[in-house]
Amino acid sequence: MEMAFYRDTWAEIDLDAVMSNVRNMKAHIGEGRKLIAVVKANAYGHGDAEVAKAALEAGADMLAVAFLDEAIALRDAGFQTEILVMGASRPTDVQLAADMNIILTAPSFEWLEEAGRNVQTGTLAVHLKLDTGMGRLGIRTEEELHKVFSFSEGKQCLNIEGVFTHFATADELDTAYFDEQYKAFETLAKTAASYGDVMIHCGNSATGLRFPDKLVHAVRLGISMYGLSPSSEMKPLLPFQLKEAFSLHSKLVHVKKINKGDKISYGATYTAEEDEWIGTIPIGYADGWVRRLRDSDVLVDGERVPIVGRICMDQCMIKLPSQKEIGTKITLIGSQKHGKIPVDEVAEKLGTINYEVTCTITSRVPRMFLRNKSIIEMRNTLLDGRKKG
Ligand SMILES: *Cc1c(COP(=O)(O)O)cnc(C)c1O
């Protein structure tokens, strides 16, 4: 395999961290409950195939994604395990899902009816979505649930293998709304179970971490598989140590001394207050290192230094404590020597959640996959096509 990239900016994905988080979660939820590894959105920006492989090796039972395209990509990559598409698919695309043995989410009676009409051969497996208060997708009443089961009974083209819901506030300390949703879920799930054997699941990372006994048959583990806490208020409650898998690095490509009064970057908004050493790094907003991160810190030799001036599309400038060699490693997210910039710090700077930070680092940034601290694989979307050619 060609392991090539020609710009020194990359993300490192620690697969041992992913595996440790999966193993700890498995132990936490106990034998007999399944772990569904959520690898939607390219595994929250980490790399779907590589994370899926590590998660399955660590004991995950099943994969979940948001869209059919993501599931097809995993099948094409050779994954034969069960894959659940949690978002809505077109009812006109269900034959493809049936052919590829991909489980779709049925968000309503009408959807299921139309899906049934579109299965020509084989069986479409579905999980029914129950809307217990998230207000996104799903069946909201017992009446509709009865309708769904009566409709599918005896139909060879449809198989309802599971039912699930999703909580809106599982990561908040106040459990009032969660309790309300859980009650609604229990009622609907009981009705579903009265029609026969179905897999019942309700928990994302937050629910799994806090209420393992409420999961019923499985947890859908997303954010905490990547070593991140579902919210900051949950951090003191974590039942085991999460290991962050994502880090982001670059290297100095240009270093210069500027004089007091000299200006930096678009708009000339930064003025040197004294003679300063300035470094340029080849990462910018087109990589997901967005303009609002101006004035945030990066690590050089383990020390924090600030970004100065506006972040450009492909580059940005940092103020160095002293002259540094070209090629010196810069860490934007993660650990470097005694320093650390966690994903949560970047999220806070942006006024967002950690989920958004790793998803935002674009595919222009190659992903390096580490096991035992060494690179075992690499994905550079720009050049991956060359391997085949
Ligand atoms: C994304 C998603 C999850 C995973 O949630 P985390 O908070 O990342 O663990 C679980 N269930 C559904 C329906 C989702 O869309």
Image: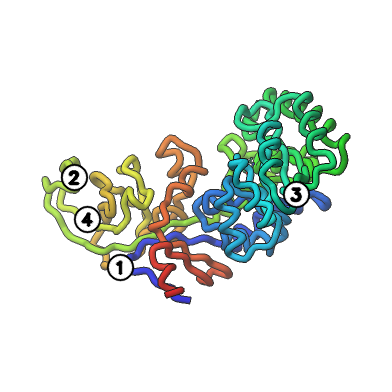
Tell me which residue sits at (58%, 49%) in the image: 68
- Of the two numbered discs 1 and 2 on the same chain, state the one appearing first in sequence: 2
Q: Position of residue 222 (x, y in %)?
A: 61, 47
The answer for how far apart the CA atoms under marks 4 and 3 are is 48 Å
Label 4 sits on a secondary structure element that is strand
Residue that carries the numbered disc 3 in the rendered image: 28
The amino acid on which the numbered mark 4 sits, given as a three-letter code, is: Ile
Callout 1 amino acid:
Gly
| Above/below status of 54 relative to 66 | below
**Residue type indicated by callout 3:** His
Q: Which residue is mark 2?
A: 266
Image quadrant of ligand 1? top right
**Quarter the C terminus occupies:** bottom left
Say what secondary structure mark 2 lies in.
helix
| Gap in angstroms between the C-alphas marked 2 and 4 | 15 Å
Marks 1 and 2, how far apart at CA: 24 Å
Q: Earlier in the sequence, mark 2 or mark 4?
A: 2
Image quadrant assignment for residue 106? top right
Tell me if residue 341 comes above or below residue 50 in the rendering. above
Nearer the N terminus, badge 2 or badge 3?
3
Q: Secondary structure at mark 1?
A: loop
Kind of residue at badge 2? Tyr
Q: Is residue 223 visible?
A: no
Is mark 4 in CB contact (under 8 Å) with mark 3?
Answer: no
